[in-house]
Image (tube, grey):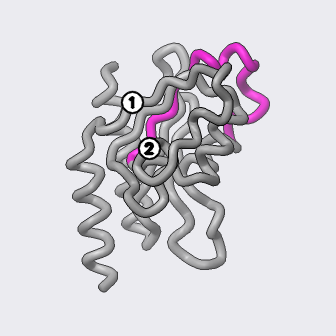
Amino acid sequence: MSLQDWMQLALTEAESASSQGHVPVGAVLVFQEKCLFKGHNLSGHSDFPLKHAEMKVLEMAMGHLSQEEWRMATLYVTLEPCPMCMGAILHTHLGRLVFGAANLKWGACGSVADLSHLYPSQNLEIIGGVLESQSQSLLSSFFKACR
């Protein structure tokens, strides 16, 4: 599958979040061309401020991948990770991060801050802008409906 195909799966997760009243962000963890875990944001309510899509997927994957396998895995997420999520991503030693829309408020991959250089020996590959317009449209529609 292509980067766009995997991101489309993450967008489906984001749509699930939106339909449940949560900020529409979805994430998919891929290893050896297989979707291992997928999830969406549950942080739309103040009771769950740490339940970001990335955190949910990373937590599900803990204990299932060796350190070497983490280095060969890819996380697809519809929105550029925030500092909290980027910190967690760096601690897993993930090999590649692919995101859709830039996060102009909290983005930690270059939009606001770039935390990827905190562990220079890690060699995390970051690809942004994959299905960016679809990701941004979903977020814009959600926040417009909230106003």
> In what element is the residue under mark 1?
strand
* Vertical placement of residue 100 versus 6, above or below: below
Residue 55: give x, y in percent of width and height.
63, 49
* Vertical placement of residue 123 versus 14, above or below: above
* Vertical placement of residue 136 versus 88, above or below: below
Specify the quadrant of the image occupied by residue 141: bottom left
For image coordinates 35% across by 49% down, the residue present is 102
For image coordinates 59% across by 52% down, the residue present is 83
* Vertical placement of residue 57 versus 45, above or below: above
Instruction: Tell me the kind of residue under disc 1.
Output: Ile
Find disc 1 in the rendering and name its residue: 127
Residue 30: give x, y in percent of width and height.
51, 26
For image coordinates 52% across by 14% down, the residue present is 32
Q: CA distance from mark 1 to mark 2?
A: 11 Å
Residue 110 is labelled as 2
Q: Residue furthest right?
A: 63
Instruction: Tell me the kind of residue under disc 2.
Output: Gly
Q: Is residue 25 left or right of residue 11?
A: right
Confirm whether residue 13 shows in the render: no
User: In the rendered structure, does residue 77 fall within the stretch colored magenta?
Assistant: yes
Q: How many marks?
A: 2
User: In the rendered structure, does residue 130 fall within the stretch colored magenta?
Assistant: no
Please give the range of residues in magenta: 60-78
Confirm whether residue 68 shows in the render: yes
Q: Residue furthest bottom?
A: 147
For image coordinates 63% across by 38% down, the residue present is 89
Q: Residues within 10 Å of mark 1 (few under 14, many from 20)?
A: some
Of the 4 image quadrants, the one containing the C terminus is bottom left
Residue 33: give x, y in percent of width and height.
46, 17
Residue 106 is labelled as none
Residue 92: give x, y in percent of width and height.
70, 32
